[in-house]
């Protein structure tokens, strides 16, 4: 009997070790890891006018990427618990590829690890910024997500804060090393704010269109998103106005404006036929990367 039980334990462990990491990896949306790290690094480059990779920046980029990845996992867990993803097999919990308690245990360990690593940083301001970002992702998923408009603003705001956190990671180190010549100046501050504002608007734009794409599922689940409340056409027009506002702010950036015009063209096509939404999303990662890079090379 003991041998049978031992074999069952060994078999289950072997299956879990293969099943759980694979499911968690999919839930984390792996694409967000390099994207969030790039956003953090871009803020550091804009802050000091050079590529200056420090241990503090590397740690900060890793923490931001981890926070983004865990927020995706937490989001799927909460959606599965609420039943809002009941018909989506892409949700690993709903598909039965991982159990809720396994996700909870994993998140608990990761959050503890993140807090410990944040505490190793020297800058108090940087620590507070990272703590705030971590707290914001948890509050967003559990409290803010069901609230119309706040959901979209929260996601865009969290993403837009990444370059600022990256800037803090290098400027604080430079200040502590008495290298005052590299401390962020007024011109760089203005450029950093413009870049963060641009990131906020393009992701706000994307979030609204994602809600348009998820209209039926959100409506059936009782989630009152912008398109559910105001109609899909009005939501698309809103996303277009958000993109236009971003162009007004960054009107002097040619490379950014060219990418923006492509997004506007796609949005007009989406207004005429929603089948173009997946095409826009497939190009968004490239267009947004060009837009962010346009600030780091300016």
Image: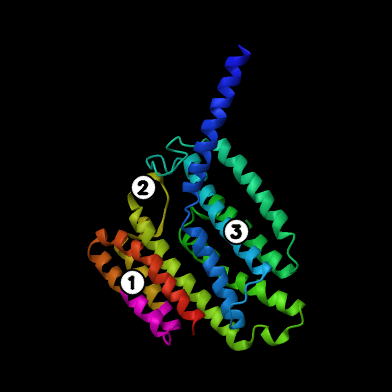
Which residue is disc 2 drawn over?
217
Which secondary structure, mark 1? helix
Q: CA distance from mark 1 to mark 3?
A: 28 Å
Question: Between disc 1 and disc 3, whose residue precedes?
Answer: 3
**Is 244 left, or right, of 19 in this rendering?**
left
Query: Residue 5, position in %: x, y?
Result: 59, 18
Pick the front one: 237 or 90: 90
Where 75 sits versus 288, above or below? above
Pick the front one: 172 or 198: 172
Which secondary structure, mark 2? helix
Question: Between disc 1 and disc 2, whose residue precedes?
Answer: 2
Residue 263 is marked as 1
Q: Which residues are magenta?
A: 246-263
Q: CA distance from mark 1 to mark 2?
A: 25 Å
Residue ID at (60%, 58%): 136
Which residue is disc 3 drawn over?
136
Pick the front one: 90 or 220: 90
Count neighbours of disc 2 (C-alpha within 10 A) and say few if under 14, some if 14 to 19, many if 20 or more: some
């Amino acid at each position: 009997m003991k041998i049978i039980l031992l074999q069952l334990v060994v078999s289950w462990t072997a299956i879990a070790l293969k099943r759980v990491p694979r499911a968690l990896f999919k839930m984390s949306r792996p694409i967000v890891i390099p994207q969030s790290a790039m956003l953090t690094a871009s803020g550091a480059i804009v802050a000091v006018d050079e590529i200056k990779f420090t241990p503090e920046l590397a740690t900060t980029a890793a923490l931001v990427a981890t926070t983004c990845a865990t927020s995706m996992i937490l989001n799927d867990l909460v959606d599965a618990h609420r039943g809002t993803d009941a018909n989506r097999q892409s949700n690993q919990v709903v598909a039965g590829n991982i159990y809720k308690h396994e996700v909870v245990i994993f998140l608990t360990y990761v959050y503890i690890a993140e807090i410990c690593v944040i505490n190793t940083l020297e800058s108090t301001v940087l620590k507070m910024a990272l703590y705030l970002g971590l707290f914001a992702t948890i509050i967003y998923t559990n409290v803010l997500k069901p609230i119309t408009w706040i959901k979209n603003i929260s996601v865009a705001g969290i993403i837009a804060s990444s370059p600022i956190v990256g800037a803090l990671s290098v400027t604080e180190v430079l200040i502590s090393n008495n290298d005052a010549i590299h401390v962020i100046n007024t011109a760089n501050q203005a450029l950093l704010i413009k870049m963060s504002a641009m990131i906020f608007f393009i992701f706000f734009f994307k979030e609204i269109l994602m809600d348009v794409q998820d209209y039926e599922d959100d409506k059936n689940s009782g989630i009152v998103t912008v398109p559910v409340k105001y109609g899909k056409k009005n939501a698309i027009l809103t996303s277009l106005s958000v993109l236009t506002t971003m162009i007004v702010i960054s009107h002097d950036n040619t490379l950014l404006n060219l990418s923006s015009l492509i997004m506007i063209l796609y949005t007009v096509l989406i207004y005429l036929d929603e089948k173009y939404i997946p095409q826009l999303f497939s190009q968004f990662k490239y267009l947004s990367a060009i837009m962010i890079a346009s600030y780091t090379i300016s």
